[in-house]
Image (cartoon, rainbow, N blue to C red):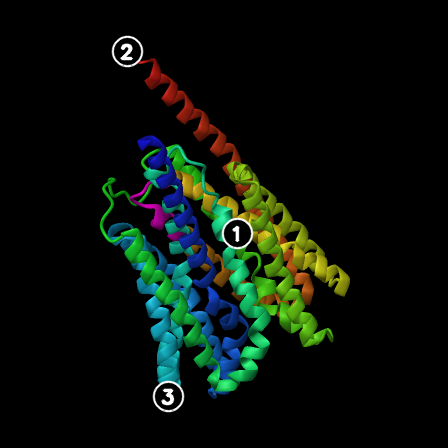
Amino acid sequence: MTRGHGSAQAEQTRDRTILSLSILSAVLFLPMGLHLPYFPVYLAARGLGPAEIGAVLATPLILRIVVTPVVAAIADARGIAATLAACALAMLAGYCGLGLAEGFPAIFATGVLAATAMGMLPALADALTLSQIRRPDLAGLRPISYSRIKVWTPIGVLAVMLLSGPIVATFPGGRIVLALGSMALVPALAALFAAVRMHRLHRPAAPDRGWLEDKAQLRLAIVVIAAAALVQSSHAQVYAFGTLHWKAAGYSPDFVGVLWAIGVGAETIFFLVMARFPRFERAAPAFLVAGAIGAVLRWLAMSTDPGPEALVALQAMHGLSFAATYLGSVLVLGGLAGPAHRARMQGRLAAASALGLALATFVSGRVAESLGETAYLLMALQAGAGLGLALLGRRLRHRVARSVAHSAAGRSAEPR
């Protein structure tokens, strides 16, 4: 009876963990669904010129390169959920400050605060999810799939994107910040609740190491981070200039919106499938390779300036080029990282991706000005370099797995 009661209680704890993480994943990025397409519109409505808008949008990308590893180190030392809550509150404060700001310096400072804090959330959310689904008290129970939690992120973002038209109609121009502030309140409250419930407020008991002691695992981590950063930042051309080119080609704003929604929808479907078949997550290095291959093929096709039907199919490949790359890299690094530096491992991945995206955006802007859509060939080349590293990472992962198995076998053979 006692054992049965304990098992039922453990299952209830597991179910509560899934529910709380799913809700947090769904609401944490709600502001992003409105921020990405309409924050530049808001800045323009506040009277900022193109150069000033560019400064507000570009500065957080640069800051994330430096700030993300620092914030991740604080999270490992002081608690991931507590640090996540602090960043969510900082995002809320930034949007509230924008509502009160007057003049470019104040708008710049508060806008950068909101966007930079938002940029901290993905790495911290991944680290928190990975730590919670591996909790010791869940040992022996059915495993929790990472994809089962992560799928709620694109669902939440997609829902806001689909509702963004009516939202902007209700809060036009400079009033968009009211909607952003209202949305930011939800993740702030959810993150605060998570910090209290999960009690991730103190320094972990494990040794505090910034990197991995095992040289083979360290090489694997560096290769995976570099591969994922190259593939993810190869999206710079479509992120920065996709909408501009499609509008110049005569496509309607509705069709352009559909193209972006297809990308997020494909990402959602990918994670839904992975959640349905969690055993596939064990092949994380293969997903990194598949994502890199998808990116190469996608950008090669985009360089030919395809028609509307082909664009729909190529946007659907976002589920491969982005989501598969993301899943593979996060799970490989999550498996390597110990509890004392799980946030830092994801933070280094986020910082490397931000650096790659900033550099690729700068280069693609220069190249696109002279080559147009042919500039996607450069993105394909970059993704190809990521593919080479992903293949190397898969090979290193097999070596690490064999080394771990050999060490375990040696320990079991020792006399007791």
Gap between marks 3 and 2 measured at Cα: 74 Å
| Label 1 packing within 10 angstroms: few (<14), some (14-19), many (20+) | many
Gap between marks 2 and 1 measured at Cα: 48 Å
Mark 2 residue element: loop
Look at discs 3 and 1 and give the one toward the viewer. Answer: 3
Q: Amino acid at mark 3?
A: Glu
Residue that carries the numbered disc 3 in the rendered image: 102
Residue that carries the numbered disc 1 in the rendered image: 230
The image quarter containing residue 352 is bottom left
Look at discs 2 and 1 and give the one toward the viewer. Answer: 2
Residues at circles 3 and 2 in contact by the CB criterion of under 8 Å:
no
Residue drawn at x 38%, y 50% is: 127
Seen in the picture, residue 356 relative to 30 is either above or below; the reply is above
Residue drawn at x 35%, y 61% is: 191
Q: Within the magenta stretch, is there residue 71?
A: no
Q: Amino acid at mark 2?
A: Pro
Q: Position of residue 369 (x, y in %)?
A: 63, 71
Image mark for residue 149: none
**First in sequence: mark 3 or mark 1?**
3
Q: Is residue 321 left or right of residue 223?
A: right
Q: Position of residue 242 (x, y in %)?
A: 63, 67
Q: Which residues are magenta?
A: 337-348
Residue that carries the numbered disc 2 in the rendered image: 415
Mark 3 residue element: loop
Q: Amino acid at mark 1?
A: Leu
Q: Nearer the viewer, residue 292 or 320?
A: 320
Q: Within the magenta stretch, is there residue 344?
A: yes
Q: Is residue 238 left or right of residue 64?
A: right
| Label 2 packing within 10 angstroms: few (<14), some (14-19), many (20+) | few
**First in sequence: mark 3 or mark 2?**
3
Seen in the picture, residue 257 relative to 147 is either above or below; the reply is below
